[in-house]
Structures are given as C-alpha cells and as structure tokens.
Image (cartoon, rainbow, N blue to C red):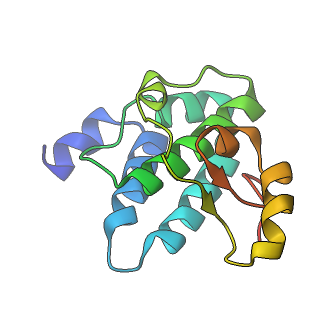
C-alpha cells in the first residue's frame, strides 16, 4: 500500500507507531527504534494507544524484537487499562531467556525485578515503559 493511501486510512498515532516499528529493522538499530517506540507509547492517550497498536506489525520480526515490542505494548495497555490487541497473543515467548545485562551477578536481580509482561516473554530487564536506563 502506498504511503499516500496509508496516510488517508491510518490515524496519526497508528501511522507513527507503524513507522517506528518499521525502523526496528532499519540501519540505526533496534535500540534507537525501541527508544522511539517507548516515547510514542508513553505519550499516547488510552484512545490513541488502542488505535495505534490495533493492527499487527507488517512482516515478520525476529523473535526477540517481536517479544520485546509485544511486552512494551502489553505494558502500555496495562497502564492505561485497555485490552491487549489480539496480535500480541499470537507472538510466542522466547524459548531461551534473554537478559538485559551480560553480568552473571545481575541475573537474580533481573529475574526478580523484570516487569511481568517481559518475564512472561522470557526477557529479563530492569526497567520498563516509563523508565529510562
């Protein structure tokens, strides 16, 4: 679908979210794209969030990126008290745990302090939506 057609069909929040997700596979790297997605999810009102994340991302994302994105969206939905979109439920959790640090001494902390949406997806980090590291 052309950019022009999408601009007429998608709301501004949906278009911003779609573009930010597309950047996950861009040359700048996922960490910058996740920072942009974090900023978007944090600023959306409940209605804008519902609209922005209603459609599943286009194309197939690598498992870690798909799970991290899903956990971010799930956390944002929980903070706003809105239902998680259906596409989130179709993203299977990672088979192997992924830790936000390579330091073995931090693993117990990460295992016990990771936000629930991330733990369910086998991702162990020390901050979540609304937090910055």
Quadrant in the picture for the N terminus: top left
- 81 displayed left or right of 108: left
For the question of whether residue 61 can be seen, the reply is yes
Report the side of 76 relative to 60 (left or right): right
The answer to which quarter of the image holds residue 76 is: top right
Give me the residue at 19% from left, 48% from top: 4
Q: Residue furthest left?
A: 1
Residue appearing at x 33%, y 66% in the figure: 25
Q: Position of residue 24 (x, y in %)?
A: 39, 63
Quarter holding the C terminus is: bottom right
Image coordinates of residue 116 in percent, x first then y, are 74, 39
Does residue 80 lie above or below 86 as drawn?
A: below
| Residue 131 showing in the rendered view | no
Picture residue at 66% right of the left edge, 22% below the top: 82
Vertical position of residue 67 compared to residue 31: above or below: above
Residue 109, quarter of picture: bottom right
x, y percent for residue 65: 45, 56
Residue 118 or 82: which is nearer the viewer? 118
Residue in front for this viewpoint, 112 or 88 = 112
| Count of all numbered marks drawn on residues in the image | 0
Q: Residue at x 77, y 67 (%)?
A: 132
Measured as percent of width and height from the top left, residue 68 is found at 54, 52
Q: Is residue 44 left or right of residue 57?
A: right
Please tell me in which quadrant of the rendered image residue 78 appears.
top right
Residue 12 to residue 29: above or below: above
């Amino acid at each position: 679908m052309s950019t022009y057609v999408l601009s007429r069909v998608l709301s501004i929040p949906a278009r911003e979210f779609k573009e930010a997700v597309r950047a996950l596979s861009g040359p700048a790297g996922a960490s910058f794209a996740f920072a942009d997605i974090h900023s978007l999810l944090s600023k959306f009102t409940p209605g804008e969030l519902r609209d922005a994340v209603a459609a599943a991302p286009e194309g197939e994302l690598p498992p870690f990126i798909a799970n991290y994105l899903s956990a971010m969206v799930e956390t944002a939905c929980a903070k706003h008290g809105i239902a998680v979109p259906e596409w989130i439920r179709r993203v299977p959790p990672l088979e192997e745990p992924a830790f936000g640090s390579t330091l073995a001494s931090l693993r117990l902390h990460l295992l016990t302090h990771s936000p629930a949406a991330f733990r369910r997806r086998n991702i162990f980090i020390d901050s979540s939506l609304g937090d910055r590291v």
